[in-house]
Image (cartoon, rainbow, N blue to C red):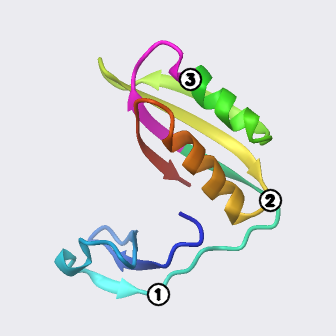
Amino acid sequence: MPGDDIIGFTTKNNKISIHKKDCNKLNEIKLKKISVKWKKIPESSVSLKILALDRVGLFGDILNNVAKLGFNIDKANANTVNKDLAECNLTLEVNKLEDIKEIVERIKKIADVKKISIS
C-alpha cells in the first residue's frame, strides 16, 4: 500500500518483486535485494485489478464504493476468469498516494474480494 515501508527483489525474469519490509516471508526470499520507494504522483491514473468470487452485483458494488469516495473512473471492465472467479479492472484518476490507499482499503471491505493489484 502506498506509504508502507517496502523492499524490492530482482526475480529470475529480471522483474522486481515488492514486499512490505515487515513481511513474514522476507527471510525465505533468496533473491537480490534492491532499494525501492513509492513514487510521488501529481495527478495521475492508476489501474487496479481486483480478483473476487464471482457473484451477482459484485461489479456494481465495486463501482458504487469507488464513486462514493468521489473518484472518477476512467475505464472499467469485468470478466469471469473461471467458474467461480471474476476479474474487475479499473482505471481511476488520483491526486496523491493516499487516494490509492483509501480506494484499496474500501474495496477490500467488499464481500468476496480476494486480491487487489495496483499498476
Write the residue at 56% across / 55% down: 119
Q: Is residue 30 above or below residue 14?
A: below
Write the residue at 17% across / 76% down: 28
Determine the CA span between mark 2 and mark 3: 24 Å
Residue occupied by mark 1: 35
Give the image location of residue 39, x and y in percent.
Answer: 65, 73
Residue type at numbered disc 3 = Phe
Q: Which residues are magenta?
A: 49-59
Residue occupied by mark 3: 59
Q: Is residue 58 magenta?
A: yes
Q: Nearer the viewer, residue 105 or 95?
A: 105
Write the residue at 48% across / 50% down: 117
Residue type at numbered disc 1 = Ser
Give the image location of residue 17, x and y in percent.
Answer: 38, 69
Of the residues under marks 2 and 1, which one precedes in the sequence? 1
Write the residue at 40% across / 30% down: 112
Q: Residues within 10 Å of mark 3 (few under 14, many from 20)?
A: many
Q: Residues within 10 Å of mark 2 (few under 14, many from 20)?
A: some
Foreground mark, 1 or 3, reads 3
Residue occupied by mark 2: 95
Residue type at numbered disc 2 = Asn
Mark 3 falls on what kind of element?
helix
Give the image location of residue 25, x and y in percent.
Answer: 23, 71
| Labels in figure, total | 3
Determine the CA span between mark 2 and mark 1: 25 Å
Quadrant of res 16: bottom left
Of the residues under marks 2 and 3, which one precedes in the sequence? 3
